[in-house]
Amino acid sequence: MGEILSCVNLTKRFGAVTALDNLSLTIDSGRIIGLLGPNGSGKTTLIKIINGLLQPTSGSVYVEGDKPGAVTKPKVSYLPDINYLNNWMTVEQIVAMFNDFYTDFRPELAYDMINRLGIDKKQRLKTLSKGNKEKVSLILVMSRNAKLYVLDEPIAGVDPATRDYIINTIINNYNPGASVLISTHLISDIESVLDEVIFIKNGSIVMHDTVDNIRSQHNMSVDDLFREVFKW
Amino acid sequence: MKWLLDKKRPICPQICEKLCVLIASGELKAGDRLMSVRDVALSAGVTPNTVQKSFEQLEQQGVIYSIRGSGWYVSDNSRIARDTLDRLVHDKTVSYLNDMQSLGLDKRDIIEIIKEFRYG
């Protein structure tokens, strides 16, 4: 098992606000990891730095030994927390665009999931519901054959049945050479598929452990522990 | 099959227990092939790493064995599986008795209730 991601003493300040405070972490390959923290704890900032969309104030990030940039983009499949797809395009056109754009894209896998979830490929994105748009975005991201999948709030807008389907998709796509980093608030839905969880608070990691260790040490689910750690 | 995992307990021992119950109850027999790691992961909704770890633990205890490139099989020695089943039966009985005693019933009452009990 190799190391896929490492963050070393990351700090990110936005003016007077410190979003990440000397944060260090490493992620091995073949792991499914939950990035959990309350609103404003720095989850999205960390994810954006991993993807090279933000520059850290100090510290560094390495994806398989390389700093985020042109070399790491083919290795990282990123689902942003906002809709970034062109609304005027049809599902079919967006799949074709991804296929053009990424050499590791597997269109047959994408269409398999699109059909199974009953999404019409001729439909324009702007006519899709919020939930269906999110499904399409996630399908596109999971249809790549990447080393690291970074999913920022992937299941927030979809119904529970689809949530289960998405979780199954993540298990089904499981590949010992790749890792999945998922930021979410919906812990109880997802905790059993996680190998590890990272609790982040005010830009620092307060806990990084396996789900089974957490449960045996605290005799409670990760969801219950989260509610206790982040109680107001 | 239903896995019904308890969210408060670690997943790995729960997977081991379920498989032991299937073996001890005879649903899985010596020499039977287990579901693949991925299939167990999908049906239980857990990560494949956890299932892999559970299988490896059961292998160490001699409950199952693996054949490279083929899969996992139930071994001949089911003592550990039976012990696990006995322990689960014991734990469930204790917790049932505790619950009933907290409702003010003694053992004799409870036995009568079980004798009289009909499903449905």
Image (tube, coloured by chain):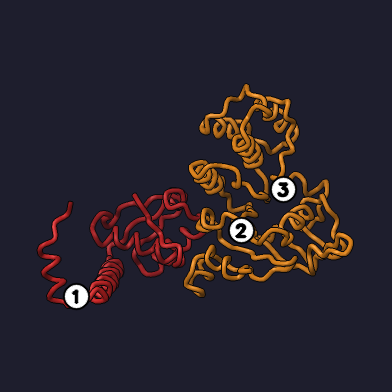
Chain colours: A orange, B red
Residue at coordinates 60% horizontally, 43% vertically from top-left?
Answer: A157
Nearer to the camera, B101 or A180: B101
Labels 1 and 2 within one chain: no
* Spatial CA span between label 1 and label 2: 47 Å
What kind of element bears circle 1?
loop
Dot 1 falls on which chain?
A: B
Looking at the rendered image, the disc whose residue lies closer to the viewer, 1 or 2, is 1
Image coords of residue A213 (percent x, y):
53, 70
Given the image, on which type of amino acid does mark 3 rest? Val
Circle 3 is placed at which residue position? A76
What kind of element bears circle 2?
strand
Given the image, on which type of amino acid does mark 2 rest? Ile
Circle 1 is placed at which residue position? B105
Looking at the rendered image, the disc whose residue lies closer to the viewer, 1 or 3, is 1
Image coords of residue A110 (percent x, y):
60, 34
Circle 2 is placed at which residue position? A33
Image coords of residue A85 (percent x, y):
73, 34
Dot 3 falls on which chain?
A: A
Say whether residue B79 is visible.
no
Looking at the rendered image, the disc whose residue lies closer to the viewer, 3 or 2, is 2
What kind of element bears circle 3?
strand
Dot 2 falls on which chain?
A: A
Location of the N terminus of chain A (image quadrant): bottom right
Label 1 Cα neighbours within 10 Å, binned few <14 / some 14-19 / many ≥20: some
Left or right of A168 on screen, residue A122: right
Label 3 Cα neighbours within 10 Å, binned few <14 / some 14-19 / many ≥20: many
Left or right of A89 on screen, residue B30: left
Disc with the residue nearer the chain's start (3 vs 2): 2
* Spatial CA span between label 3 and label 2: 15 Å
* Spatial CA span between label 1 and label 3: 61 Å
Nearer to the camera, B77 or A160: A160
Nearer to the camera, A154 or A78: A154
